[in-house]
Image (tube, rainbow, N blue to C red):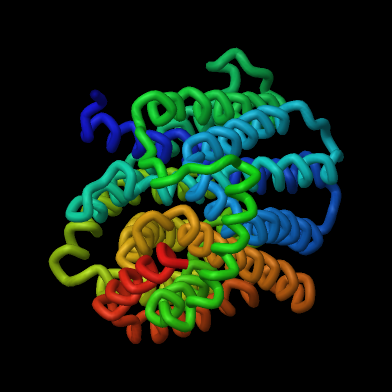
Amino acid sequence: MTSRKTGVLSWALYDWANSAFATTVMAAFFSIFFSSYWSSGRDSTVTTFWLGIANSAESLLVAVLAPFLGAIADKSGAKKKMLILFAFTGALLTITLAMIGSGAWVQAMFVYIIASAGFAGANIFYDSMLTDVAQEQDVDFVSALGYALGYIGGGLLFLINVLMYLFPAFFGLADDGGVSAVKVSFVLVGLWWIVFTIPLIIFVREKRSAKPVSFIQAGREGIRNVLFTLRSLRQLKQCALFLVAFWCYIDGVDTIIRMAVDYGTSLGFPAQSLIIALLITQFTAFPAALLYNIIGSKIGKKRAILIAIAAYGAISLVGFFMTSVTQFYVLAVMIGLFQGGIQALSRSYFTRFVPKGHEAQFFGFYNMLGKFAAIIGPLLVGIATLVTSSHRAGIFSLVILFLIGGILLSRVDEEEGAKAAEDYNAVAQGD
C-alpha cells in the first residue's frame, strides 16, 4: 500500500517537473529566442504584439476546453490519464522547439501554443488531484509544498540552462550567441518534465467516482454537468464571487510572469541581467511559498491573499517607473516573495468552495478563468504597447486589475460558500 506521504511527495514532484517549462521556456528563453532568432529583424513593438497574441491564443484554447475536460475526468475517473496525455504532449512539443530554424516565427508560435496548452491542460487535472492526496487539514500545506518544489526544481534546471547560455564552451557547445544552448535547454526541459512525472504516475492513487462510466458517456454527462454548474452559480454565489475576483487578480499575476522578460528587453536591459532576475525570483519564491502558507494560517487565508494582491499592485507601479537593472532586481525579489504565496493560497482556498466529487469539474472552471485572464492581460499589454509605442503603458494598466480583484475578494464569505457547496452536492447527487 502506497503511504500517504509518498503520494503527497509524488504529487508535489509534478510541480518540480512542469515548472521547468514555466521558467526556462515561458518566462525566459522563448521570449528571448523569439525576438532574437525566430523573429529577428522585426520591430520590438511588433514582436511584443505577436508574443502577446501567442500567449493569448494558448490561453483561449485551454479556457474553452478546461471546464469540459474537468467534468469528463470526474465522471470517467481519468484525471491521472488525462494529466499524463497533456503533460507528455507538452513535453514532446517543447523538445520540438529545438528543431525549428531561424526566421520560422510562425512555426515557433504554433508549437509553443500547443506545448503551453499541454502545460496548462495538465495543470487542470494536477490541481484537482490535490484533494486525492491531501487530507482536509493538510490541503494548504500540500498546495504550498507543490509550489515550493516547483520553484526549486524549475529553478535548478533553469540555473543549469543559464550556465549553458553564459558559458557554452564549458558544456561543449558552440559559442553562437546562445543559439545552441537555448536549443539544448528546450530538450532538457522536455526530458525533465517527463522523468519527474513518473512518480505521480506510479504512486498517486486517484479517488475513483462512485460509478465510473465510459469516456463517451463521461463526455455527455460532463457537458451536462458543466451546464448544470453554470446554472448553479446563482446558488454558489460565494464561489462565483471568488472566481471573478481570482479572474481579475490572477490576470495581473500571470501577465507579469509571462511578459516580464519582454518588458525588460524593451527597456534595454541586457539578456544576462534578465536571466539573473528570473533566478532571483525562483530562489526567493521557494522558501517564500512555504513561509507564506504559515503566515496565511496565522492571519487567515483570505487576508494573506489580499496582502499579496496589494503587493502586486505595488509591483506594477514599480515596474512602470523602473529605469535601471538594479530596480529590476528589486522587482524580482518582490515578485518572488508573493508569487508562490498568492498561487498556492488561491488554489487551496478555492477547495473550500468545491463540492466533493466534482473537483476536476470545478477546477476546470478555476483554470478556465485563470486562462481567460491570461488572454486579456498579454493581449492588453501587446495592444497598448503597439498603439502607444510605449512598453510602460501596458504594465501600468495592471494596477486596476489588482484593485478590482482585491475589492471583490474582500466580500467573499467562506462559511457561506462552504455551506452552499454542501447543498450543491446534495442537489447534484439527486439530479
Whether residue 306 is visible here, answered yes or no, is no
Q: Position of residue 255 (x, y in %)?
A: 57, 63
Q: Which residue is situated farthest in the left direction here?
A: 298
Outermost residue on the front side: it is 430
Towards the viewer: 396 or 108: 108
Q: Nearer the viewer, residue 13 or 416?
A: 416
Q: Please state the horizontal and vertical placement of residue 295, each as a whole percent of the image.
A: 18, 63
Task: Give the percent coordinates (x, y) of residue 348.
Answer: 32, 59
Note whether 357 is above or below 37 in the view shown: below
Residue shown at 85% from the left, 48% from the top: 41
Classify residue 58 by image quadrant.
Answer: bottom right
Q: Residue placed at 49% from the left, 72% from the top?
A: 316
Say which quadrant the N terminus sits in.
top left
Vertical side of 337 occupied by 216: above or below: above
Q: Position of residue 370 (x, y in %)?
A: 53, 63
Q: Is residue 25 left or right of residue 5?
A: right
Taking the spot 22% from the left edge, 48% from the top edge, the residue there is: 135
Mark yes or no: residue 13 visible. yes
318 w.r.t. 207: above or below? below
Q: Residue at x 49, y 57 (%)?
A: 361
Residue 152 placement, left or right of 278: left
